[in-house]
Image (cartoon, grey):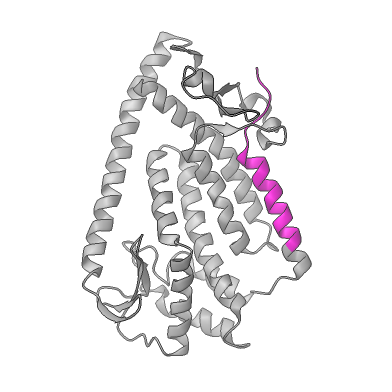
Amino acid sequence: MPGSIFYIVLNMSIASCVVIVALFLVRLLKPIPRRYIYPMWALAFFRLAVPFIPSSRWSLFNLTGGFVKRIVDIETVTRGTVSAPEPVDLVILNAVGAIDSYDPVTYREESLEQIFNVSSAVWAVVAVGALLAVCLLYIFTYRELRKAFHIEGAIYRSEMVLSPVLTGVLRPRIILPPGVDPESTTGKMILEHENVHRKRLDNLWRALAVGIACVHWFNPLVWLMLRAFFRDMELSCDETVLKRGKYGSDGSKAYASALLQFAENRSIFVPSAFGSSGVRVRIVNVLNYKRMTVIGAVASAIFLLAVAFALITNPSFRG
C-alpha cells in the first residue's frame, strides 16, 4: 500500500512537469503581464495535489504520445468504491507504467514492487521531515514577530525586520521596520503593495505551495516552479500597485527606488519581505511597465483560458 501511494504521487509529479514547462514557456511572452500569469500557477499546484482529473479531447496530454503509457479511471484504482458522475470521466495518468493491475495492485515484476516500497519509505521520511522543518521555521518566525508594536489596523512595527514584511497566514499583519513612515509616499506604496498580498491571501498560497513542494521534494522542476511562483507573485503585486496609478508619472521611479532601498535588507527567513524575490528583475519590470489596451487584455485572457483548459484536463484516449 505505501508503495502504491508513492506510485500515484510519482505519476502526478511526472504529469506536472508538462504543465510546469508549458507555464515557463508562457512566461516568455513579454506582452502578457505577470498579474495575468501569476494565477496560472494554480494549474501546476492542482496537478501536484489532485490525482484524478477529468479527461478531455482538448487536453495537451493528447499530444504527448508515448509519454503517457495509459490512463486509469478512478473506479479501477479505488476498486469501485468511488465513481465519477456521468458524463465526467475522472482519470489518472500512468506515465510510469510499472503496474499491471490495480485490483489488486500488481507490479510488472517483483523487483519493481521492492523498489517502490523502499522508495516510498524514503519519500515519506524526507517529506515529513521537510514539512516539520517548515512548520518549525514558521512558528519561530511568528513568535518573534508577535512582539511587534501595533500602529493601526493591520500595521505593526518591529526592530526584528529590516524590510517591510507580511506575516501570518489566516490573519496576516504588515510589519514595518524602524524608519518607515506609513504617511510618506514611500510608506504608502509599501503599504499598498503589502495590502495587495494581504487581500489576495498570498501568504496562504505561499504556504500551500511550499507544502506541495515538500511532498514532491524529489522533482527538481517543482523547486524551479516554486522560485518562479514567488517571483511572479511579487511582479504581479508590483504591477497591481502601478496599475492603480495613484502616484503620477514619477510613481514608477519612486516605486523602483523603494525596492532598491530595501533590496540589501532582505532575509532568507522572511521570504515575503518587500525587497525580496529578484529585486533587479522587479525594478526593470516596474520601470518598463505600460498599461495594456482593452484589446490586449481581452486577447491575453482568451489565450490564457485556452492554455488553462488544455493543461487542467487529462487525455481522453486509452491503451
Taking 31 as reference, is 147 left or right?
left
Front residue of 67/55: it is: 55
> Where in the figure is residue 290, as x and y percent of width and height?
68, 74
| Up/down of 121 relative to 253, above or below | above
Q: Does the magenta portion include 310?
A: yes
> Where in the figure is residue 187, as x and y percent of width and height?
42, 84
Name the quadrant of the N terminus: top left
Q: Does the magenta portion include 141?
A: no
Which residue: 31% across, 45% down? 131
Q: In which quarter of the image is residue 29?
A: bottom right
| Up/down of 266 relative to 231, above or below | below
Residue 280 visible (yes or no): yes
Q: Give the range drawn in magenta.
A: 298-319
Front residue of 302/177: it is: 302
Taking 105 as reference, is 66 left or right?
right
> Where in the figure is residue 189, as x and y percent of width and height?
48, 81
Residue 284 visible (yes or no): no
Count the numbered circles shown. Answer: 0
> Where in the figure is residue 90, as x and y percent of width and height?
58, 29
| Up/down of 49 relative to 142, above or below | above
View extreme (front): residue: 86
View extreme (right): residue: 295
Predominant secondary structure in magenta? helix
Taking 80 as reference, is 309 left or right?
right
Name the quadrant of the C terminus: top right
Which residue: 61% across, 82% down? 245
| Up/down of 174 relative to 304, above or below | below
Which residue: 35% across, 23% down? 2
